[in-house]
Image (cartoon, helix red, strand yellow):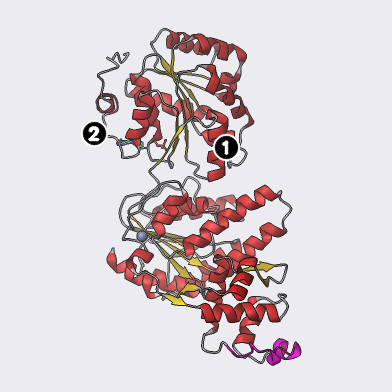
Amino acid sequence: AVHERDETAEDPRETLREVFGFEDFRPGQKPVVDALLSGQNVLAVMPTGAGKSLCFQVPALMRPGFAVVVSPLIALMQNQVALLQSFGAPAGMLHSGRTREENVADWKAAVAGEIKLLYMSPERLATERMQAALAKADVSLFVIDEAHCISQWGHDFRPEYLALENLKTLKPGTPVAAFTATADEDTRADMVERLFAGNVETFVSGFDRPNLTLSVEEKSGPDKRIEELLHERRGQQGIVYCGSRKNTENLAEKLSAAGHNAIAYHAGLPDEERGERLNRFLSEPDLVVCATIAFGMGIDKPDIRYVIHRDMPASPEAYYQEIGRAGRDGRPAEAILLYSASDLMFRRRMIDDGGAPEDIKRHEKRKLDILSAYCEALTCRRNLLLGYFGEMRTEPCGKCDVCIDPPKTEDATADARLFLEAAMETGEVYGQAHLIDVLRGAETEKVLKAKHDDLTVFARGTKRPAKSWRSLVGQLFAQGYVEMQGEYRSIVVTPQGRGFLNAGGSVSLKKTRAKETTQALKKTQ
Ligand code: ADP
Ligand code: ZN
């Protein structure tokens, strides 16, 4: 049946109810629907599962003409078309997996007004014949699904998407709507330029996962610490992400020895073994999986109660995706990250020393900066993460560790100065461990041999424990006072650090967080 409607009087909620049977739009959907109904171009950034399909399907059913929906995969088209048809919404598709007759029939139905949504591949849309035909047809709306495929910055560049650049001039007055789950700023800017030449309204929504509590702990003795964390979460199912295969196996072994039902999972296991472990994960409700990022693709188990990161995730996007596997049932779940500033510094060095072009290096380092800022946050962690994805909030969430137990800051001006001086006086060629030894007055072989016990800074920092010094160095790095260079990760004072040494100023740092925070969070659930 064709949904004939009086265009001016229609309320999109009516269509939503009548066709799809949903009571109301989700908060992020309505603004997109309204913008498309009023004929605006739209870029909508929504994570998977937020409900982007309805954002264009409802306007497509309401506007005169038929919507052209570009989708990268035949399987995706088939799913969507079948789903629409099951709701009685007239939809069709053109793709290489069907006979010519079937394709012609759907095209004719669209032109005759019998189909309101016509799905096709970007290759098909790119043909001259199709563009000429579309120029004459009554198209209500162009929809580009997985729009990040047009950008080389995205993780899924498809050259055939580049042909979509002419959509913006193909039919003036016909709105173009692009949808993606990719939040990365460079990719987004690229999409805006290529698809819309800047003429677009961008909407970002749906990234918040309110049932997830977020917390970060400084990493020291991570395996032991994870064992403690799991002790309080016995009987619950969770994932512990590790940075290497070896770490997954070591950790799983230690946890098993401590009486937990734990296994390792990584891409190095034989297929059969992986399948078996996956089955255990699906069937044993208390199983802890110590995994590399190989674990997760397609894992959709609703009752995962926690995701712990033993090691740093690769990027904010990766982190969001990995913690997103917890609490899909909507019940309280936890995301706990064990953070080490020196891990991050090491990664930064690897990027610097790698052979990538400068702009790629900059892009990758920016992602590390965001992770670092997330870990060192002095204000609501959730808002920081959502802000990165483009979803701006000002009200603190009240549920992350920072909101519940705000970090205490201290005036660390004197010690920051001492540390920078130690680095300068020793020629900026030593790593943090040695500098901390010097400041703490440790008479190590290395200190004595270099005669660093003769320096004025020697033993000037005995009041601060070594662990606290390491945290201070991490924060000096996060705030841009020092960098680490070369194979030995030598501490080098940045121009900003030099400015501080010469001109003065004050440095305020967060005190080392106590481990009780995660426990405190646990009690608030
Ligand atoms: P995405 O394409 O963003 O990954 P979908 O469009 O497939 O997400 O929607 C995800 C799920 O949410 C689907 O099962 C869909 O039916 C459901 N959904 C979307 N919008 C609503 C709504 N307003 N009310 C209830 N359920 C909705
Ligand atoms: Zn918060």
- Tell me which residue sits at (38%, 11%) in the image: 114
In the rendered image of this protein, does residue 288 appear above or below residue 416? above
Residue that carries the numbered disc 2 in the rendered image: 23
Q: Amino acid at mark 1?
A: Asp
Residue that carries the numbered disc 1 in the rendered image: 190
Q: Amino acid at mark 2?
A: Glu
Q: Quadrant of the C terminus?
A: bottom left
In the rendered image, residue 274, in percent from the top left (x then y), is placed at: 54, 53
Q: Which mark is residue 422?
A: none
Mark 2 surroundings: few (<14), some (14-19) or many (≥20) residues within 10 A: few
Residue 72 in sight in this render = no
In the rendered image, residue 211, in percent from the top left (x then y), is placed at: 32, 54
Residue 288, quarter of picture: bottom left
Query: Foreground residue, 329 or 367?
Result: 367
Mark 1 surroundings: few (<14), some (14-19) or many (≥20) residues within 10 A: some
- Which quadrant of the render holds ligand 2? bottom left
Residue 162, quarter of picture: top right
The residue at label 2 has a CB less than 8 Å from ligand 1 = yes
In the rendered image, residue 87, in percent from the top left (x then y), is placed at: 32, 24
- Tell me which residue sits at (54%, 14%) in the image: 99
In the shown orientation, is residue 404 left or right of residue 239? Answer: left
Q: Regarding mark 2 in the picture, which secondary structure is present there? A: loop
In the rendered image, residue 499, in percent from the top left (x then y), is placed at: 61, 70
Magenta-tinted stretch: 446-460
Mark found first going from the N terminus, 2 or 1: 2
Q: Quadrant of the N terminus?
A: top left
